[in-house]
Amino acid sequence: MAPMCYVFCKTEFGKEKEVIDGLKKIEGVKEVNGLYGFYAIEVKVHEESLDKIRDTVTNKIRKHPYIYETNSLIVAGDIE
């Protein structure tokens, strides 16, 4: 299984649509959804390595000007 990560984002109020549209353009981002609750946006990232996930999250998602907080969860895969 290729490495996968979920990133939950807090954004500036009223900027959710603009952030979602921008995140969808990032290579490695496979899905973006708006949320109701503690976080405004959920981002699903698939990459070929953990280093690429780190680069995508750190240098692309977290640097978006309207994202002010993230929580990243790397998928562990099958747990037996």
Image (cartoon, helix red, strand yellow):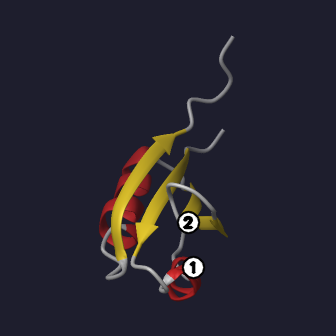
Q: 61 above or below 48?
A: below
Q: Secondary structure at mark 1?
A: helix
Q: CA distance from mark 2 to mark 1?
A: 7 Å
Query: Is 34 placed above or below 37 here?
Result: below
The x and y percentages for residue 8 are: 49, 56
Disc on res. 1:
none
Marker disc for residue 41: 2
Percent of width and height locating residue 35: 63, 63
In percent of the image, x 53 and y 48: which residue is there? 5
C-beta proximity under 8 Å, tags 2 and 1: yes
Give the residue displayed 58% in from the left and 60% down from the top: 42
Looking at the picture, how far across and down is residue 23, in whole percent?
Answer: 52, 77
Q: Amino acid at mark 2?
A: Ile
User: Residue at (65%, 17%) from the top-left corner?
Assistant: 79
The 10 Å Cα crowd at callout 2, few under 14, some 14 to 19, many 20 or more, is many
| Res 65 quadrant in image | bottom left
Residue linked to disc 1:
20
Residue type of the residue flagged with mark 1: Ile
Is 6 situated left or right of 54 in this image? right
Task: Locate the N terminus and report the quarter of the image it occupies.
Answer: top right
Assign a secondary structure to mark 2: strand
